[in-house]
Amino acid sequence: MRPELRCTVDRLDRPSAYYSSRFNKRRRNDRDHRDGDNDAPAEPAQPPEDPLANATTLYVGNLSFFTTEEQVYELFSKCGEIKRLIMGLDRFNKTPCGFCFVEYFTHQDALDCMKYIGGTKLDERIIRTDLDPGFEEGRQYGRGKSGGQVRDEYREDFDEGRGGLGRALQDERRNRYQDEDIDRYR
């Protein structure tokens, strides 16, 4: 009697949690906004087409703010020929902000890259790779007030390797100058 084997590794080409939540939200909205035809027969639910089934684009996260496009290209070209590389930018300063998109010519190259490069170190930081449904103009900019990838207004810890400490240092300097001004006028 052979024991039942169980797979302990997640599939690499499954939709991300981000995509799944967006799709579910859209499906919920469609259901809420339907016409009031309760008498009409319900259409059989068709499973949505998986946008990552043939995805050739990778999202690469947790990059150092000081990682160059050449370093990323050199590392990721070891898994296949790169079609396009888009660095994530601060919306206002147009400086790198810790992520990028790498587009390959084939889906298999993207999967190989996730398998072999995801979780490795680049510029002393462990990088994260995920399949992406495809790059669209405007996604190269970060999200926070300062254009960083992480929403700065919710951030408590700062990492110098990711260009952090900027806001913390500004607050510290502002407080120091205010204290000096108060002492000067006493």
Image (cartoon, grey):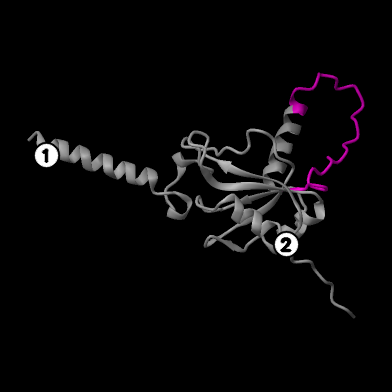
Label ID, residue 147:
none
Confirm whether the magenta stretch covers residue 155.
no
Hey, which quadrant is residue 72 in on the image? bottom right
Work out whether residue 31 or residue 163 is closer to the camera in this orientation and state it.
163
Give the position of the C terminus as an image quadrant: top left
Q: Which residue is mark 2?
A: 115
**Residue in the image at 78% along x and 56% along y:** 109
Name the residue at the left extreme: 186
Confirm whether the magenta stretch covers residue 56.
yes
119 on left or right of 50: left
Assign a secondary structure to mark 1: helix
**Residue in the image at 49% along x and 33% along y:** 92
Label ID, residue 183:
1
Residue 114 picture location, percent across and down:
71, 58
Question: Which stretch appears magenta?
Answer: 30-57
Name the residue at the bottom extreme: 1
The main secondary structure of the magenta stretch is: loop
Q: Is residue 182 above or below residue 109?
A: above
Any part of residue 135 in sight? yes
Q: CA distance from mark 1 to mark 2?
A: 59 Å
Work out whether residue 68 or residue 90 is closer to the camera in this orientation and state it.
68
Work out whether residue 4 or residue 26 is closer to the camera in this orientation and state it.
26
Residue 49 picture location, percent across and down:
84, 41
Give the position of the N terminus as an image quadrant: bottom right
Residue 127 picture location, percent across and down:
60, 57
Residue 155 picture location, percent across and down:
45, 45
Q: Is residue 39 above or below residue 2?
A: above
Assign a secondary structure to mark 2: helix
Q: Residues within 10 Å of mark 2 (few under 14, many from 20)?
A: few
173 on left or right of 152: left
